[in-house]
Image: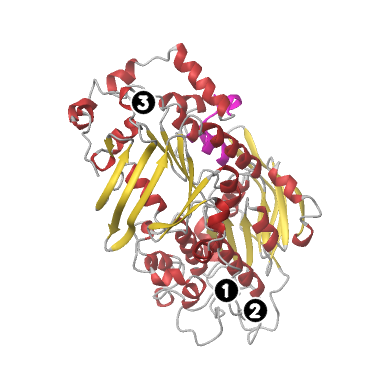
Amino acid sequence: MRAAPIPEAMLDPTSFGRDAVGLGSTLTEGLDVRHGTILTLEDINVSFDGFKALTNLTLYIGVGELRCIIGPNGAGKTTMMDVITGKTRPDSGVAYFGEQYDLTRLSEVQIAQAGIGRKFQKPTVFEALSVFENLELAQKTDKSVWASLRARLSGEQRDRIEEVLTTIRLEGSRQRPAGLLSHGQKQFLEIGMLLVQEPHLLLLDEPVAGMTDAETEFTAELFKSLARQHSLMVVEHDMGFVGSIADHVTVLHQGSVLAEGSLDQVQNDERVIEVYLGREPSPPAPLPQAGEGRQAVRCCISAPCPSPLPFMGEGQGEGSFIGCAVRTKTKVKDITMLQVQQLHQYYGGSHILRGLSFEVRVGEVTCLLGRNGVGKTTLLKCLMGLLPAKEGQVQWEGHSITAYKPHQRVQAGIAYVPQGREIFGRLTVEENLLMGLSRFPASQAREVPAIIYELFPVLREMKQRRGGDLSGGQQQQLAIGRALASQPRLLILDEPTEGIQPSVIKEIGVVIRKLAERGDMAILPVEQFYDFAAELADQYLVMSRGEIIQQGRGETMEAEGVRGLVTI
Protein backbone atom coordinates (compact mmCIF):
# COMPACT_ATOMS: atom_id res chain seq x y z
CA MET A 1 0.00 0.00 0.00
CA ARG A 2 1.04 3.63 -0.43
CA ALA A 3 3.47 5.30 1.93
CA ALA A 4 1.81 8.67 2.32
CA PRO A 5 3.89 11.55 3.67
CA ILE A 6 3.54 12.49 7.31
CA PRO A 7 2.86 16.17 8.08
CA GLU A 8 6.12 17.84 9.07
CA ALA A 9 4.61 19.14 12.31
CA MET A 10 4.09 15.57 13.42
CA LEU A 11 7.63 14.43 12.66
CA ASP A 12 9.37 17.48 14.16
CA PRO A 13 10.10 16.73 17.85
CA THR A 14 10.44 20.44 18.60
CA SER A 15 6.79 20.94 17.71
CA PHE A 16 5.71 19.55 21.09
CA GLY A 17 7.29 22.19 23.27
CA ARG A 18 6.02 25.61 24.26
CA ASP A 19 4.42 26.26 20.88
CA ALA A 20 2.96 22.77 20.50
CA VAL A 21 -0.29 22.37 18.67
CA GLY A 22 -2.97 21.28 21.13
CA LEU A 23 -5.27 18.29 20.96
CA GLY A 24 -7.95 18.68 18.35
CA SER A 25 -6.27 21.63 16.65
CA THR A 26 -5.42 21.98 12.95
CA LEU A 27 -3.87 18.51 12.86
CA THR A 28 -7.39 17.02 13.08
CA GLU A 29 -8.73 19.27 10.36
CA GLY A 30 -8.83 18.33 6.72
CA LEU A 31 -8.73 14.55 7.28
CA ASP A 32 -8.57 12.95 3.84
CA VAL A 33 -11.34 10.34 3.64
CA ARG A 34 -12.00 10.62 -0.09
CA HIS A 35 -12.54 6.85 -0.41
CA GLY A 36 -14.99 6.71 2.51
CA THR A 37 -12.63 4.80 4.83
CA ILE A 38 -11.44 6.39 8.07
CA LEU A 39 -9.37 3.44 9.38
CA THR A 40 -7.41 0.90 7.36
CA LEU A 41 -5.64 -2.11 8.90
CA GLU A 42 -4.03 -4.56 6.48
CA ASP A 43 -2.05 -7.70 7.36
CA ILE A 44 -1.19 -6.52 10.87
CA ASN A 45 1.05 -8.91 12.83
CA VAL A 46 2.02 -8.54 16.51
CA SER A 47 3.85 -11.05 18.69
CA PHE A 48 4.95 -11.00 22.33
CA ASP A 49 7.78 -13.35 23.29
CA GLY A 50 6.81 -15.74 20.51
CA PHE A 51 3.07 -15.52 21.23
CA LYS A 52 1.09 -14.32 18.19
CA ALA A 53 -1.35 -11.68 19.42
CA LEU A 54 -2.41 -10.54 15.93
CA THR A 55 -2.03 -12.61 12.76
CA ASN A 56 -2.55 -10.94 9.36
CA LEU A 57 -5.38 -8.83 10.77
CA THR A 58 -7.22 -6.87 8.08
CA LEU A 59 -10.05 -4.47 8.94
CA TYR A 60 -11.67 -1.37 7.40
CA ILE A 61 -13.89 1.18 9.21
CA GLY A 62 -16.03 3.57 7.18
CA VAL A 63 -16.67 7.25 7.83
CA GLY A 64 -19.57 7.67 10.29
CA GLU A 65 -19.75 3.91 10.89
CA LEU A 66 -20.53 2.32 14.25
CA ARG A 67 -18.64 -0.97 14.18
CA CYS A 68 -18.83 -3.51 17.00
CA ILE A 69 -15.89 -5.83 17.64
CA ILE A 70 -16.58 -9.03 19.58
CA GLY A 71 -14.58 -12.16 20.24
CA PRO A 72 -13.22 -14.44 22.95
CA ASN A 73 -11.01 -13.09 25.70
CA GLY A 74 -7.49 -13.22 24.29
CA ALA A 75 -8.64 -12.78 20.67
CA GLY A 76 -6.48 -9.67 20.20
CA LYS A 77 -9.09 -6.91 20.59
CA THR A 78 -7.08 -4.82 23.05
CA THR A 79 -3.85 -5.38 21.10
CA MET A 80 -5.62 -4.13 17.97
CA MET A 81 -6.60 -0.93 19.80
CA ASP A 82 -3.03 -0.61 21.08
CA VAL A 83 -1.77 -0.70 17.49
CA ILE A 84 -4.31 1.92 16.36
CA THR A 85 -3.34 4.30 19.18
CA GLY A 86 0.42 3.78 18.91
CA LYS A 87 0.88 1.97 22.21
CA THR A 88 2.09 -1.16 20.39
CA ARG A 89 4.13 -1.21 17.20
CA PRO A 90 3.16 -4.00 14.79
CA ASP A 91 5.85 -6.37 13.56
CA SER A 92 4.47 -5.89 10.04
CA GLY A 93 1.44 -4.58 8.23
CA VAL A 94 -0.24 -1.31 7.28
CA ALA A 95 -2.29 0.99 9.52
CA TYR A 96 -3.70 4.25 8.14
CA PHE A 97 -6.00 6.90 9.60
CA GLY A 98 -7.75 8.45 6.65
CA GLU A 99 -5.53 8.59 3.60
CA GLN A 100 -2.61 10.56 4.99
CA TYR A 101 -1.69 9.38 8.50
CA ASP A 102 0.50 6.28 8.78
CA LEU A 103 -0.22 5.17 12.35
CA THR A 104 2.86 2.94 12.49
CA ARG A 105 5.08 6.05 12.26
CA LEU A 106 3.30 8.24 14.84
CA SER A 107 3.54 8.42 18.63
CA GLU A 108 0.55 8.05 20.93
CA VAL A 109 0.36 11.83 21.41
CA GLN A 110 0.53 12.47 17.68
CA ILE A 111 -2.23 9.94 17.01
CA ALA A 112 -4.44 11.59 19.62
CA GLN A 113 -3.75 14.95 17.99
CA ALA A 114 -4.68 13.51 14.62
CA GLY A 115 -8.18 12.81 15.93
CA ILE A 116 -8.36 9.33 17.48
CA GLY A 117 -9.74 9.09 21.01
CA ARG A 118 -9.72 5.99 23.20
CA LYS A 119 -11.78 4.99 26.20
CA PHE A 120 -10.30 2.17 28.25
CA GLN A 121 -12.30 -0.62 29.90
CA LYS A 122 -11.57 0.65 33.40
CA PRO A 123 -12.55 4.33 33.75
CA THR A 124 -9.46 6.53 33.91
CA VAL A 125 -10.78 9.78 35.36
CA PHE A 126 -9.08 12.17 37.79
CA GLU A 127 -10.91 11.20 40.96
CA ALA A 128 -9.73 14.13 43.09
CA LEU A 129 -11.04 16.67 40.55
CA SER A 130 -14.65 17.62 39.98
CA VAL A 131 -16.60 16.41 36.96
CA PHE A 132 -16.34 19.89 35.41
CA GLU A 133 -12.58 20.05 36.04
CA ASN A 134 -12.10 16.65 34.37
CA LEU A 135 -13.81 17.93 31.24
CA GLU A 136 -11.90 21.22 31.39
CA LEU A 137 -8.60 19.34 31.58
CA ALA A 138 -9.52 17.13 28.60
CA GLN A 139 -10.19 20.05 26.22
CA LYS A 140 -8.38 20.41 22.91
CA THR A 141 -6.03 23.14 24.11
CA ASP A 142 -2.30 23.72 24.15
CA LYS A 143 -0.90 21.46 26.89
CA SER A 144 2.53 23.06 27.20
CA VAL A 145 3.50 24.26 30.69
CA TRP A 146 3.26 28.00 30.13
CA ALA A 147 0.04 27.77 28.16
CA SER A 148 -1.52 25.65 30.89
CA LEU A 149 -0.51 28.10 33.62
CA ARG A 150 -2.04 31.02 31.69
CA ALA A 151 -5.12 29.15 30.52
CA ARG A 152 -8.55 30.68 31.14
CA LEU A 153 -11.86 29.28 30.01
CA SER A 154 -13.50 31.22 27.25
CA GLY A 155 -17.25 31.51 27.00
CA GLU A 156 -17.25 29.17 24.01
CA GLN A 157 -15.23 26.54 25.91
CA ARG A 158 -17.52 26.78 28.92
CA ASP A 159 -20.56 26.37 26.68
CA ARG A 160 -18.99 23.31 25.08
CA ILE A 161 -18.38 21.71 28.50
CA GLU A 162 -21.97 22.43 29.53
CA GLU A 163 -23.17 20.86 26.28
CA VAL A 164 -21.16 17.71 26.96
CA LEU A 165 -22.41 17.57 30.57
CA THR A 166 -25.95 17.54 29.23
CA THR A 167 -25.08 14.91 26.63
CA ILE A 168 -23.67 12.52 29.25
CA ARG A 169 -26.36 13.38 31.82
CA LEU A 170 -23.98 14.66 34.48
CA GLU A 171 -25.12 18.29 34.53
CA GLY A 172 -26.37 17.83 38.10
CA SER A 173 -22.98 16.50 39.24
CA ARG A 174 -20.70 19.10 37.66
CA GLN A 175 -19.06 20.07 40.97
CA ARG A 176 -18.99 16.59 42.46
CA PRO A 177 -15.55 14.92 42.87
CA ALA A 178 -15.20 12.27 40.18
CA GLY A 179 -14.10 9.74 42.83
CA LEU A 180 -17.59 9.86 44.35
CA LEU A 181 -19.37 8.99 41.12
CA SER A 182 -20.82 5.54 40.57
CA HIS A 183 -19.06 3.19 38.17
CA GLY A 184 -21.54 3.96 35.39
CA GLN A 185 -21.19 7.71 35.90
CA LYS A 186 -17.40 7.40 35.67
CA GLN A 187 -17.86 5.61 32.37
CA PHE A 188 -20.03 8.50 31.12
CA LEU A 189 -17.50 11.05 32.35
CA GLU A 190 -14.67 9.38 30.45
CA ILE A 191 -16.81 9.36 27.31
CA GLY A 192 -17.42 13.07 27.88
CA MET A 193 -13.68 13.66 28.22
CA LEU A 194 -13.30 12.19 24.73
CA LEU A 195 -16.14 14.24 23.29
CA VAL A 196 -14.66 17.59 24.35
CA GLN A 197 -11.61 16.70 22.22
CA GLU A 198 -13.90 16.31 19.17
CA PRO A 199 -12.14 13.24 17.73
CA HIS A 200 -12.99 11.82 14.32
CA LEU A 201 -12.67 8.20 15.51
CA LEU A 202 -13.66 6.93 18.97
CA LEU A 203 -12.34 3.61 20.26
CA LEU A 204 -14.50 2.37 23.13
CA ASP A 205 -13.36 -0.69 25.10
CA GLU A 206 -16.25 -2.45 26.89
CA PRO A 207 -18.08 0.81 27.67
CA VAL A 208 -21.09 -0.82 29.39
CA ALA A 209 -19.15 -3.24 31.63
CA GLY A 210 -20.60 -2.94 35.14
CA MET A 211 -23.48 -0.68 34.07
CA THR A 212 -27.11 -1.19 35.03
CA ASP A 213 -29.69 -1.99 32.36
CA ALA A 214 -30.93 1.61 32.37
CA GLU A 215 -27.39 2.98 31.96
CA THR A 216 -26.74 0.47 29.17
CA GLU A 217 -29.88 1.59 27.32
CA PHE A 218 -28.83 5.24 27.60
CA THR A 219 -25.32 4.39 26.35
CA ALA A 220 -26.84 2.71 23.29
CA GLU A 221 -28.88 5.84 22.52
CA LEU A 222 -25.80 8.01 23.05
CA PHE A 223 -23.61 5.98 20.71
CA LYS A 224 -26.22 5.92 17.95
CA SER A 225 -26.47 9.71 18.12
CA LEU A 226 -22.66 10.12 18.13
CA ALA A 227 -22.33 7.95 15.02
CA ARG A 228 -23.83 10.79 13.00
CA GLN A 229 -20.85 13.00 13.84
CA HIS A 230 -18.02 10.51 14.54
CA SER A 231 -16.87 7.04 13.56
CA LEU A 232 -17.05 4.55 16.45
CA MET A 233 -15.32 1.23 17.11
CA VAL A 234 -16.93 -0.50 20.11
CA VAL A 235 -15.42 -3.60 21.74
CA GLU A 236 -18.10 -5.26 23.87
CA HIS A 237 -19.20 -8.63 25.29
CA ASP A 238 -22.81 -7.65 26.09
CA MET A 239 -24.62 -9.15 23.09
CA GLY A 240 -27.89 -7.38 23.91
CA PHE A 241 -26.08 -4.04 23.79
CA VAL A 242 -24.28 -4.99 20.57
CA GLY A 243 -27.60 -5.93 18.99
CA SER A 244 -29.10 -2.57 19.90
CA ILE A 245 -26.41 -0.44 18.22
CA ALA A 246 -24.53 -2.34 15.52
CA ASP A 247 -25.23 -2.57 11.82
CA HIS A 248 -22.00 -4.45 11.23
CA VAL A 249 -20.14 -6.80 13.60
CA THR A 250 -16.60 -8.17 13.34
CA VAL A 251 -15.58 -11.27 15.29
CA LEU A 252 -11.91 -11.69 16.19
CA HIS A 253 -10.35 -15.01 17.16
CA GLN A 254 -6.67 -15.81 17.69
CA GLY A 255 -5.64 -12.43 16.33
CA SER A 256 -7.55 -12.63 13.02
CA VAL A 257 -11.01 -11.86 11.67
CA LEU A 258 -13.14 -14.98 12.13
CA ALA A 259 -16.45 -13.63 10.80
CA GLU A 260 -18.13 -10.38 9.74
CA GLY A 261 -21.68 -9.35 8.99
CA SER A 262 -24.89 -8.48 10.79
CA LEU A 263 -25.35 -9.65 14.37
CA ASP A 264 -27.78 -12.34 13.26
CA GLN A 265 -25.27 -13.64 10.76
CA VAL A 266 -22.39 -13.92 13.21
CA GLN A 267 -24.57 -15.31 16.01
CA ASN A 268 -25.62 -18.16 13.72
CA ASP A 269 -22.08 -18.88 12.55
CA GLU A 270 -21.06 -22.27 13.96
CA ARG A 271 -17.47 -21.11 14.38
CA VAL A 272 -18.58 -18.11 16.48
CA ILE A 273 -20.85 -20.28 18.63
CA GLU A 274 -18.00 -22.71 19.25
CA VAL A 275 -15.28 -20.23 20.25
CA TYR A 276 -17.24 -17.32 21.70
CA LEU A 277 -20.96 -17.56 22.41
CA GLY A 278 -20.60 -21.09 23.77
CA ARG A 279 -22.94 -23.99 24.03
CA GLU A 280 -24.47 -25.15 27.27
CA PRO A 281 -21.42 -26.47 29.13
CA SER A 282 -21.33 -30.04 30.40
CA PRO A 283 -21.21 -29.89 34.19
CA PRO A 284 -17.92 -31.02 35.69
CA ALA A 285 -17.79 -34.19 37.76
CA PRO A 286 -19.57 -33.65 41.09
CA LEU A 287 -17.33 -32.55 43.91
CA PRO A 288 -17.52 -34.69 47.04
CA GLN A 289 -19.92 -33.33 49.60
CA ALA A 290 -18.51 -32.07 52.86
CA GLY A 291 -18.67 -34.93 55.30
CA GLU A 292 -18.24 -37.76 52.77
CA GLY A 293 -15.77 -40.02 54.54
CA ARG A 294 -14.96 -37.21 56.93
CA GLN A 295 -17.61 -35.20 58.77
CA ALA A 296 -16.98 -31.48 59.00
CA VAL A 297 -17.43 -28.56 61.39
CA ARG A 298 -15.70 -25.21 61.66
CA CYS A 299 -12.22 -24.95 63.12
CA CYS A 300 -10.57 -22.22 65.15
CA ILE A 301 -10.77 -18.99 63.14
CA SER A 302 -7.45 -17.65 64.36
CA ALA A 303 -5.22 -20.09 62.47
CA PRO A 304 -5.26 -22.44 59.50
CA CYS A 305 -7.05 -25.70 60.13
CA PRO A 306 -4.60 -28.40 61.29
CA SER A 307 -6.59 -31.03 59.39
CA PRO A 308 -7.69 -29.70 56.00
CA LEU A 309 -10.30 -31.54 53.98
CA PRO A 310 -9.12 -32.70 50.53
CA PHE A 311 -10.93 -30.70 47.88
CA MET A 312 -11.51 -33.51 45.42
CA GLY A 313 -11.13 -36.52 47.64
CA GLU A 314 -7.99 -38.31 48.76
CA GLY A 315 -5.02 -39.13 46.59
CA GLN A 316 -4.72 -35.76 44.84
CA GLY A 317 -1.21 -35.08 46.03
CA GLU A 318 0.21 -32.48 48.36
CA GLY A 319 -1.52 -29.12 48.12
CA SER A 320 -4.60 -30.51 46.36
CA PHE A 321 -7.06 -29.56 49.04
CA ILE A 322 -9.46 -26.79 49.80
CA GLY A 323 -11.93 -26.08 52.55
CA CYS A 324 -11.51 -26.52 56.28
CA ALA A 325 -12.68 -29.47 58.32
CA VAL A 326 -11.75 -31.84 61.12
CA ARG A 327 -12.68 -35.41 61.84
CA THR A 328 -16.00 -35.20 63.64
CA LYS A 329 -19.54 -36.45 63.42
CA THR A 330 -21.20 -33.07 62.76
CA LYS A 331 -21.91 -31.71 59.27
CA VAL A 332 -21.35 -28.11 58.21
CA LYS A 333 -24.43 -27.90 55.98
CA ASP A 334 -26.93 -25.12 56.78
CA ILE A 335 -24.72 -23.39 59.36
CA THR A 336 -24.72 -19.56 59.31
CA MET A 337 -21.15 -18.68 58.44
CA LEU A 338 -21.25 -14.86 58.17
CA GLN A 339 -23.57 -12.59 60.07
CA VAL A 340 -23.65 -8.80 59.58
CA GLN A 341 -25.48 -6.72 62.17
CA GLN A 342 -26.38 -3.03 61.86
CA LEU A 343 -23.34 -2.11 59.77
CA HIS A 344 -22.72 1.59 59.09
CA GLN A 345 -20.03 3.29 57.02
CA TYR A 346 -19.36 6.91 56.08
CA TYR A 347 -17.25 8.82 53.54
CA GLY A 348 -16.78 12.29 54.96
CA GLY A 349 -20.29 13.55 55.58
CA SER A 350 -21.91 10.94 53.33
CA HIS A 351 -23.69 8.04 55.02
CA ILE A 352 -22.84 5.16 52.64
CA LEU A 353 -24.00 2.04 54.54
CA ARG A 354 -27.10 2.42 56.68
CA GLY A 355 -27.60 -0.30 59.25
CA LEU A 356 -27.09 -3.37 57.03
CA SER A 357 -28.03 -6.74 58.53
CA PHE A 358 -27.97 -10.12 56.76
CA GLU A 359 -26.64 -13.67 56.98
CA VAL A 360 -24.65 -15.88 54.61
CA ARG A 361 -25.06 -19.64 55.03
CA VAL A 362 -22.69 -22.41 54.12
CA GLY A 363 -23.53 -24.43 51.02
CA GLU A 364 -25.41 -21.51 49.47
CA VAL A 365 -24.84 -18.78 46.90
CA THR A 366 -26.04 -15.47 48.35
CA CYS A 367 -26.23 -12.93 45.51
CA LEU A 368 -26.02 -9.23 46.35
CA LEU A 369 -27.63 -7.02 43.69
CA GLY A 370 -28.13 -3.31 43.26
CA ARG A 371 -27.56 -0.43 40.91
CA ASN A 372 -24.23 1.40 40.67
CA GLY A 373 -23.35 3.64 43.59
CA VAL A 374 -25.58 2.01 46.23
CA GLY A 375 -22.65 0.85 48.42
CA LYS A 376 -22.04 -2.76 47.33
CA THR A 377 -18.26 -2.49 46.93
CA THR A 378 -18.03 -0.47 50.14
CA LEU A 379 -19.82 -3.30 51.94
CA LEU A 380 -17.37 -5.88 50.60
CA LYS A 381 -14.41 -3.76 51.68
CA CYS A 382 -15.91 -3.59 55.17
CA LEU A 383 -16.36 -7.37 55.21
CA MET A 384 -12.68 -7.79 54.29
CA GLY A 385 -11.45 -5.18 56.79
CA LEU A 386 -10.14 -2.90 54.05
CA LEU A 387 -12.49 -0.24 55.43
CA PRO A 388 -13.02 -0.44 59.21
CA ALA A 389 -16.72 -0.43 60.06
CA LYS A 390 -17.81 2.74 61.85
CA GLU A 391 -20.68 1.01 63.61
CA GLY A 392 -22.10 -2.49 63.79
CA GLN A 393 -20.75 -6.04 63.97
CA VAL A 394 -19.36 -8.62 61.57
CA GLN A 395 -19.70 -12.13 63.02
CA TRP A 396 -17.78 -15.11 61.60
CA GLU A 397 -19.04 -18.48 62.78
CA GLY A 398 -20.27 -16.95 66.00
CA HIS A 399 -17.14 -14.90 66.70
CA SER A 400 -16.79 -11.16 66.16
CA ILE A 401 -14.18 -10.25 63.55
CA THR A 402 -15.18 -6.58 63.37
CA ALA A 403 -11.73 -5.50 64.60
CA TYR A 404 -9.79 -8.00 62.48
CA LYS A 405 -7.24 -6.78 59.94
CA PRO A 406 -7.57 -8.01 56.33
CA HIS A 407 -4.86 -10.66 56.71
CA GLN A 408 -6.57 -12.01 59.84
CA ARG A 409 -9.82 -12.42 57.91
CA VAL A 410 -7.96 -14.30 55.19
CA GLN A 411 -6.47 -16.55 57.88
CA ALA A 412 -10.00 -17.09 59.17
CA GLY A 413 -11.04 -18.47 55.78
CA ILE A 414 -12.45 -15.50 53.83
CA ALA A 415 -11.28 -14.92 50.24
CA TYR A 416 -12.02 -11.86 48.12
CA VAL A 417 -11.94 -11.43 44.34
CA PRO A 418 -12.12 -7.64 43.85
CA GLN A 419 -13.68 -5.82 40.93
CA GLY A 420 -10.83 -5.30 38.49
CA ARG A 421 -9.16 -8.61 39.54
CA GLU A 422 -5.93 -6.99 40.82
CA ILE A 423 -3.68 -9.82 39.75
CA PHE A 424 0.10 -9.32 39.77
CA GLY A 425 0.79 -8.38 36.17
CA ARG A 426 4.55 -9.07 36.24
CA LEU A 427 4.24 -12.46 37.93
CA THR A 428 3.45 -15.63 36.01
CA VAL A 429 0.10 -17.36 36.31
CA GLU A 430 1.67 -20.03 38.51
CA GLU A 431 3.31 -17.43 40.75
CA ASN A 432 -0.01 -15.59 41.11
CA LEU A 433 -1.70 -18.82 42.18
CA LEU A 434 1.07 -19.61 44.66
CA MET A 435 0.44 -16.20 46.25
CA GLY A 436 -2.93 -17.59 47.28
CA LEU A 437 -1.12 -20.16 49.43
CA SER A 438 0.82 -17.53 51.37
CA ARG A 439 -1.25 -18.02 54.52
CA PHE A 440 0.01 -21.59 54.91
CA PRO A 441 3.36 -22.98 56.12
CA ALA A 442 5.98 -23.39 53.41
CA SER A 443 5.55 -27.16 53.41
CA GLN A 444 1.91 -26.70 52.30
CA ALA A 445 2.57 -23.90 49.81
CA ARG A 446 4.98 -25.44 47.34
CA GLU A 447 2.56 -26.50 44.63
CA VAL A 448 -0.61 -25.11 43.10
CA PRO A 449 -3.59 -27.33 44.08
CA ALA A 450 -4.39 -29.58 41.12
CA ILE A 451 -8.10 -28.76 41.42
CA ILE A 452 -7.43 -25.14 40.41
CA TYR A 453 -6.19 -26.31 37.03
CA GLU A 454 -9.08 -28.76 36.76
CA LEU A 455 -11.60 -25.97 37.33
CA PHE A 456 -9.79 -23.56 34.99
CA PRO A 457 -7.80 -25.57 32.39
CA VAL A 458 -6.64 -22.40 30.61
CA LEU A 459 -4.51 -21.56 33.66
CA ARG A 460 -2.54 -24.78 33.28
CA GLU A 461 -1.92 -23.99 29.60
CA MET A 462 -0.68 -20.49 30.45
CA LYS A 463 0.95 -21.04 33.84
CA GLN A 464 4.32 -19.67 32.65
CA ARG A 465 2.83 -16.55 31.03
CA ARG A 466 2.79 -13.24 32.88
CA GLY A 467 -0.54 -12.34 34.42
CA GLY A 468 -0.51 -8.95 32.72
CA ASP A 469 -0.41 -10.61 29.31
CA LEU A 470 -3.67 -12.51 29.86
CA SER A 471 -7.01 -11.37 28.48
CA GLY A 472 -9.69 -10.01 30.79
CA GLY A 473 -11.53 -13.34 31.01
CA GLN A 474 -8.34 -15.25 31.69
CA GLN A 475 -7.37 -12.76 34.40
CA GLN A 476 -10.79 -13.22 36.01
CA GLN A 477 -10.28 -16.99 36.11
CA LEU A 478 -6.81 -16.42 37.54
CA ALA A 479 -8.18 -14.12 40.26
CA ILE A 480 -10.81 -16.70 41.26
CA GLY A 481 -8.22 -19.49 41.17
CA ARG A 482 -5.87 -17.49 43.39
CA ALA A 483 -8.68 -16.94 45.89
CA LEU A 484 -9.57 -20.64 45.89
CA ALA A 485 -5.93 -21.55 46.49
CA SER A 486 -6.23 -19.93 49.93
CA GLN A 487 -8.74 -22.67 50.84
CA PRO A 488 -11.59 -20.34 51.82
CA ARG A 489 -14.85 -21.19 53.48
CA LEU A 490 -16.37 -17.92 52.26
CA LEU A 491 -15.66 -16.75 48.71
CA ILE A 492 -16.58 -13.11 47.97
CA LEU A 493 -16.69 -12.04 44.31
CA ASP A 494 -17.18 -8.44 43.17
CA GLU A 495 -18.72 -8.34 39.66
CA PRO A 496 -17.27 -11.69 38.48
CA THR A 497 -18.87 -11.42 35.00
CA GLU A 498 -17.75 -7.87 34.19
CA GLY A 499 -16.00 -7.72 30.82
CA ILE A 500 -16.19 -11.49 30.28
CA GLN A 501 -17.22 -13.29 27.09
CA PRO A 502 -20.52 -15.26 27.23
CA SER A 503 -18.97 -18.73 27.15
CA VAL A 504 -16.61 -17.95 30.05
CA ILE A 505 -19.52 -16.50 32.05
CA LYS A 506 -21.25 -19.86 31.71
CA GLU A 507 -18.10 -21.69 32.82
CA ILE A 508 -17.69 -19.45 35.88
CA GLY A 509 -21.35 -20.02 36.77
CA VAL A 510 -20.86 -23.79 36.65
CA VAL A 511 -17.79 -23.55 38.92
CA ILE A 512 -19.63 -21.36 41.46
CA ARG A 513 -22.61 -23.70 41.60
CA LYS A 514 -20.44 -26.79 42.06
CA LEU A 515 -18.42 -25.15 44.83
CA ALA A 516 -21.63 -24.27 46.68
CA GLU A 517 -23.15 -27.71 46.18
CA ARG A 518 -20.11 -29.31 47.76
CA GLY A 519 -21.52 -28.09 51.04
CA ASP A 520 -18.58 -26.67 53.02
CA MET A 521 -18.27 -23.22 51.42
CA ALA A 522 -20.44 -20.11 51.29
CA ILE A 523 -20.30 -17.86 48.21
CA LEU A 524 -21.22 -14.16 48.13
CA PRO A 525 -21.14 -12.68 44.61
CA VAL A 526 -21.97 -9.03 43.94
CA GLU A 527 -23.47 -8.90 40.47
CA GLN A 528 -25.11 -6.50 38.01
CA PHE A 529 -25.99 -9.24 35.53
CA TYR A 530 -29.49 -10.18 36.72
CA ASP A 531 -29.85 -13.37 34.67
CA PHE A 532 -26.53 -14.72 35.97
CA ALA A 533 -27.53 -13.97 39.57
CA ALA A 534 -31.03 -15.41 39.18
CA GLU A 535 -29.66 -18.68 37.84
CA LEU A 536 -27.21 -19.13 40.72
CA ALA A 537 -28.84 -17.60 43.78
CA ASP A 538 -30.03 -19.68 46.71
CA GLN A 539 -30.60 -16.42 48.56
CA TYR A 540 -30.67 -12.86 47.23
CA LEU A 541 -30.16 -9.41 48.75
CA VAL A 542 -31.04 -6.13 47.00
CA MET A 543 -29.32 -2.90 48.06
CA SER A 544 -30.45 0.66 47.48
CA ARG A 545 -28.94 3.80 49.01
CA GLY A 546 -26.88 1.83 51.50
CA GLU A 547 -29.71 -0.35 52.77
CA ILE A 548 -31.01 -3.87 52.16
CA ILE A 549 -34.45 -3.12 50.73
CA GLN A 550 -35.45 -6.68 49.84
CA GLN A 551 -34.21 -10.22 50.36
CA GLY A 552 -35.51 -13.70 49.77
CA ARG A 553 -34.92 -17.08 48.14
CA GLY A 554 -33.41 -17.28 44.68
CA GLU A 555 -36.29 -19.22 43.16
CA THR A 556 -38.69 -16.35 43.94
CA MET A 557 -36.62 -13.50 42.43
CA GLU A 558 -38.67 -13.10 39.26
CA ALA A 559 -42.01 -13.34 41.06
CA GLU A 560 -40.90 -10.79 43.65
CA GLY A 561 -39.89 -8.22 41.02
CA VAL A 562 -36.16 -8.19 41.68
CA ARG A 563 -35.31 -7.45 38.05
CA GLY A 564 -37.16 -4.15 38.26
CA LEU A 565 -35.38 -3.18 41.47
CA VAL A 566 -31.94 -3.44 39.91
CA THR A 567 -32.65 -2.07 36.43
CA ILE A 568 -34.75 1.04 37.02
Question: x%, y% of residue 437?
Answer: 45, 69
Residue under label 1, please give it: 323
For image coordinates 44% across by 69% down, the residue present is 458
Quarter of the image for residue 511 reads bottom right
Q: Secondary structure at mark 3?
A: loop
User: How far apart, in angstroms, are the residues tagged by discs 3 and 2?
Assistant: 62 Å
Q: Main secondary structure of the magenta part?
A: helix
The residue that label 2 is drawn on is 290
- The alpha-carbon separation of the residues under discs 1 and 2 comes to 9 Å
Q: Whole-percent x and y of residue 143?
A: 32, 24
Q: Tag 1's secondary structure?
A: loop
Residue occupying image coordinates x 73% and y 45%: 565
User: Which class describes the residues within 10 Å of circle 1: few (<14), some (14-19), or many (20+)?
Assistant: many
Please indicate whether residue 237 sits to the left or right of residue 394 in the image.
Answer: left
Q: Reading the chain from its start, which is encountered first: label 1 or label 2? A: 2
Task: Work out whether 558 lies above or below 9.
Answer: below
Residue 515, located in which quarter of the rendered image? bottom right
Bounds of the magenta segment: 170-190
Q: Is residue 496 visible?
A: no
Marks 1/2 in contact by CB < 8 Å: the verdict is yes
Residue that carries the numbered disc 3 in the rendered image: 24
Viewer-side residue, 392 vs 355 = 355
